[in-house]
Image (cartoon, rainbow, N blue to C red):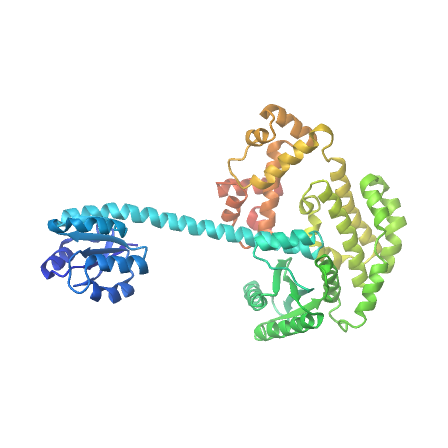
């Protein structure tokens, strides 16, 4: 795209001579306008928005220096070239103060002006590239912030983030989560008539419409999870306000999708006073979304109180997680989980409370040991679906065993002894720098003050993986998260998880998961 040049000169012969004889196109420019003095030029400059202004210094009404001053204030990006006679050289100093790009003495030949323009084009190209690079960087930062916001909101609704962490991280990510009351709602987008054929493109359009309506309210925080599910975290000053806002929002959404083949149903929890209790509202929302044919909230408070009484014995559970063995799961389940589970299965709400209680206790253990909960227990990313599919005591046993035994395996393989802190520091460093394509064993070894060879042996012994395997696994897990939770292209995700070559990233991803990134996203 050529750069635009505007020319101001009161001498008609000079103006037309330069206008008609300079080969603007070959120099990478487009002549976009001219004027006889500065005063006439100003409105034309505002309309033309040029990249370069060439102006004579002495003109009637408004001279070149006055014009340059106004342009510098109103259009700071414009490069200014001043043309001056030999006896006007004393103006050069003022021109420099105004930030004029070039100062040419008359008579100015066509060749001299073209040479100046070609040099200026190199500078403009560089600035344009820097602007484009800056814009891409800002977009990447925003995309990364969006992923981090979704992760924080998910940790919030499942009770894995402390109030302090939620408030501090929320502020850094542009989320104001401080309020007197909170409520969680789950939106499901479904075909109005199940016999109709599913249309993926229309579903995506409806989902975007729903998200736009929800995001208009600054007190609503949106989290996109699983197939068709949207989780809303709402805040407000009173419980009554939150319940009214929830009903109003659903009515707005229903109107917005009324002419489509889809309908939106909502399951809402009850308002809560504390950030730490948001996960309870989430559990209630899960129960309500599973009971769409019921009467909604009737008797909900009574069921909630019952759920509180049926929570798992925390002391017994924590003792088992810290010192129990995997082969002792059956005995523990029969003694502590089956009695609660059999009663819980009679109510979706109580079942969800009990199941979430188990998951959160396991998550706390993994967090205490310095692990990433969603990596050690990947089931956490689809907890809504798992809970909705648990209908029998055997299914509850199977799912809880899978989650608990993962945590026990992680506990048993956790680094200990003299290298515990060293490995923890190394993992934290990898977590902070996995996006750097230059991250290597030597770099991390240097960070923990060990030789590369010694660090390689220690890392493999304590972690059970080579450094390379661990780094690849970390990057692939982060890539999975971005594929699940964002609409970023595979190439963009490659760059965000530390791969300069998208094709190589795709190859590594398939080698480790059995699927290409596109196939993985399609499965989701």
- The reply, left or right, for residue 97 in relation to residue 394 is left
Q: Nearer the viewer, residue 424 or 509?
A: 424
- Which residue does the image show at 57% across and 75% down from the upper left? 259
Determine whether, in the image, residue 510 is placed left or right of residue 22: right
As drawn, 458 above or below 162? above
Q: Position of residue 161 (x, y in %)?
A: 69, 52
Residue 396 pos. (x, y %): 81, 53
Q: Residue at image x 89%, y 45%?
A: 331
Q: Name the residue: 64% across, 55% down.
A: 167
Can residue 438 be seen here? yes
Q: Is residue 444 above or below residue 342?
A: above
* In front of the other: 466 or 99: 99
| Quarter of the rendering occupied by the N terminus | bottom left
Residue 445, image quadrant: top right
Quadrant in the picture for the C terminus: bottom right
Q: Is residue 107 visible?
A: no
Q: Quadrant of residue 208?
A: bottom right
Q: Which of the 4 image quadrants contains residue 346?
A: bottom right
Residue 73 horizontal/vertical position (percent):
31, 59
Residue for point 17% across, 65% down = 61
In the foreground, 386 or 5: 5
Residue 84 spot, x, y in % from top left: 15, 52
Q: How many marks?
A: 0
Q: Residue furthest left?
A: 13
Left or right of 223 on screen, residue 47: left
């Amino acid at each position: 795209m050529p750069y635009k040049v505007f020319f101001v000169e009161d001498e008609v012969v000079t103006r037309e001579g330069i206008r008609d004889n300079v080969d603007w196109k070959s120099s990478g420019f487009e002549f976009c306008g001219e004027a006889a003095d500065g005063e006439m030029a100003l409105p034309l400059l505002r309309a033309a928005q040029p990249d370069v202004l060439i102006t004579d210094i002495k003109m009637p009404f408004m001279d070149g220096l006055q014009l340059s001053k106004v342009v510098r204030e109103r259009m700071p990006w414009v490069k200014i070239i001043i043309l001056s006679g030999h006896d006007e050289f004393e103006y050069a100093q003022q021109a420099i103060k105004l930030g004029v790009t070039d100062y040419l003495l008359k008579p100015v030949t066509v060749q001299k002006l073209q040479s100046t323009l070609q040099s200026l084009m190199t500078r403009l190209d560089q600035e344009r590239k820097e602007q484009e690079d800056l814009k891409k960087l800002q977009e990447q930062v925003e995309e990364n912030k969006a992923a981090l916001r979704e992760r924080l909101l998910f940790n919030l609704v499942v009770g894995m983030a402390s109030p302090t962490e939620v408030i501090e991280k929320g502020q850094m990510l542009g989320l104001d989560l401080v309020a007197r009351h909170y409520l969680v709602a789950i939106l499901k987008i479904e075909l109005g008539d199940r016999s109709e054929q599913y249309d993926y493109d229309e579903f995506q359009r409806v989902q975007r419409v729903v998200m736009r309506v929800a995001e208009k309210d600054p007190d609503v925080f949106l989290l996109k999870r699983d197939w068709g599910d949207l989780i809303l975290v709402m805040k407000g000053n009173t419980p009554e306000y939150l319940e009214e806002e929830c009903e109003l929002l659903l009515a707005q959404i229903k109107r917005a999708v009324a002419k489509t083949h889809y309908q939106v149903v909502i399951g809402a929890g009850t308002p809560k006073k504390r950030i730490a209790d948001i996960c309870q509202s989430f559990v209630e929302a899960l129960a309500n979304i599973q009971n769409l044919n019921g009467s909604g909230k009737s008797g909900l408070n009574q069921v909630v109180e019952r759920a509180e009484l049926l929570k798992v014995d925390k002391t017994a559970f924590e003792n088992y997680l810290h010192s129990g063995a995997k082969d002792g799961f059956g005995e523990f389940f029969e003694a502590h989980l089956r009695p609660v589970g059999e009663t819980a299965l009679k109510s979706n709400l109580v079942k969800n409370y009990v199941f979430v209680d188990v998951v959160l206790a396991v998550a706390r253990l993994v967090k205490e040991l310095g692990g990433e909960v969603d990596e050690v227990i990947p089931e956490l990313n689809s907890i809504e679906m798992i809970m909705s599919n648990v209908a029998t005591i055997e299914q509850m046993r199977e799912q809880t065993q899978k989650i608990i035994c993962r945590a026990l395996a992680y506990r048993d393989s956790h680094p200990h002894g003299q290298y515990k802190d060293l490995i923890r520091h190394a993992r934290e460093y990898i977590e902070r720098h996995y996006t750097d394509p230059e991250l290597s064993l030597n770099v991390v070894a240097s960070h923990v003050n060990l030789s590369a060879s010694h660090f390689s042996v220690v890392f493999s012994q304590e972690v059970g993986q080579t450094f390379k395997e661990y780094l690849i696994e970390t990057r692939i897990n982060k890539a999975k998260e971005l594929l699940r939770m964002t609409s970023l292209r595979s190439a963009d995700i490659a760059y965000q998880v530390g791969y300069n070559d998208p094709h190589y990233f795709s190859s590594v991803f398939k080698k480790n998961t059995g699927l290409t990134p596109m196939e993985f996203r399609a499965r989701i």
